[in-house]
Structures are given as C-alpha cells and as structure tokens.
Image: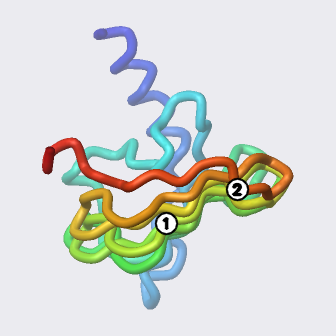
C-alpha cells in the first residue's frame, strides 16, 4: 500500500499541468488511465478545484470533459475512447447522476441507454450489441431501493 501511494504521488506530481486559463477556470490534466479511475478523480478532495476540467490521455487526445462545482461534477460529463469516439455521456445534478446516460461501443455505436434520478437507477435500460441492434431491456432498479 505504501509503495502504491508513493507511485501515485509521483504520477500526480508529473501529471498535473494546473490551471491554464484563470479567467475561465479551465484545467488540463494528463492522465494514464491504467492508474486512475474513469472520472479522472485522482486528486484528493482538497485538491479538486471548481471549473471546467479537460482530462487528456498521454497522447494528448481528450479523455474526459466536465465541470466541477463544490468538488462535484455538475451538468453533462463526456468521456472518450482513445480513438476519439464518445465513450460515455452522462448528466449530473448536485453531483449525482440525474437524467439520461449513454454508453458507446468503441466503434461509436450505442451500447447502453440508462436513466438515473438523484443518483438512483430508474426507467427502462436498453442494451445494444456493437452493430447497434437492441439485445436487452431491463428495468433500472437501484439495489438500495429493493
């Protein structure tokens, strides 16, 4: 564990580029997705700053775009495959998933359309194969609601 924390701190020290434009609070961060979660939230809670965040793969392509307020994602967050195609588009309100969320296959075809309300799974979820054919529908019931 200690070794992991040392490695993590090393990557943080060389990966964070900092604030690029102080008038718009746009932050650019380079991330190696093998070491950090899909939201790029590899900074400690005290290091997260309000503003627009753009997370980059090591090759400079965009990995994620989202806006933080009070250390929570607000509005719509976008995540991209390394090939540049959209991976996930999800809507947040008050830091919780709220609304339609779409996941995409690497080829750009829709994978899953899901619905969320206040961070809980709701509605009918649709699953598609990589050719775009609907393969399954399920009711999105959050495990915390029974």
Determine the residue positioned at 70% across, 56% down: 134
Left or right of 61 in this view: 140: left
Looking at the rendered structure, the secondary structure element under dot 2 is strand
Res 2 visible = yes
Direction left: furthest residue: 145
Determine the residue positioned at 22% across, 42% down: 143
Q: Nearer the observer, disc 1 or disc 2? A: 2
Q: Residues within 10 Å of mark 2 (few under 14, many from 20)?
A: some
Quadrant of residue 96 within the rendered picture: bottom left
Q: Position of residue 104 (x, y in %)?
A: 68, 56
The quarter of the rendered structure image containing the N terminus is: top left
Left or right of 56 in this view: 6: left
Determine the residue positioned at 20% across, 71% down: 70
Of residue 85 and residue 33, the one placed in the foreground of this image is: 85
Q: Quote the CA–CA distance across marks 1 and 2.
A: 16 Å
Please, is residue 107 above or below residue 22 in the view? above
Name the residue tied to disc 2. 134
What colour-coding does the image apply? rainbow
Please, is residue 95 above or below residue 41 in the view? below
Determine the residue positioned at 22% across, 74% down: 94
Q: Position of residue 78 (x, y in %)?
A: 57, 67
Name the residue tied to disc 1. 101
Of residue 72 and residue 97, the one placed in the foreground of this image is: 97
Res 54 visible = no
Q: Residues within 10 Å of mark 1 (few under 14, many from 20)?
A: some
Looking at the rendered structure, the secondary structure element under dot 1 is strand
Numbered-mark total: 2
Q: Position of residue 135 (x, y in %)?
A: 68, 48
Q: Position of residue 115 (x, y in %)?
A: 41, 66
Is disc 1 in contact with disc 2, using a CB cutoff of under 8 Å?
A: no
Mark 1 or mark 2: name the one nearer the start of the chain. 1
Quadrant of residue 87 within the rendered picture: bottom right
């Amino acid at each position: 564990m200690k070794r992991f924390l040392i490695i993590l701190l090393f990557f943080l020290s060389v990966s964070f580029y900092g604030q690029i434009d102080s008038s718009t609070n746009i932050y650019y961060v380079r991330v190696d997705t093998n070491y950090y979660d899909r939201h790029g939230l590899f900074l400690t809670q005290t290091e997260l700053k309000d503003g627009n965040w753009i997370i980059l793969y090591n090759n400079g392509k965009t990995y994620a775009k989202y806006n933080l307020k009070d250390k929570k994602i607000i509005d719509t967050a976008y995540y991209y495959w390394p090939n540049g195609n959209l991976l996930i588009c999800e809507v947040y309100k008050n830091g919780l998933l709220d609304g339609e969320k779409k996941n995409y296959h690497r080829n750009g075809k829709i994978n899953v359309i899901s619905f969320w309300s206040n961070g809980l799974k709701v509605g009918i979820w649709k699953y598609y194969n990589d050719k775009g054919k609907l393969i399954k529908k399920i009711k999105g019931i959050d495990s915390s609601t029974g």
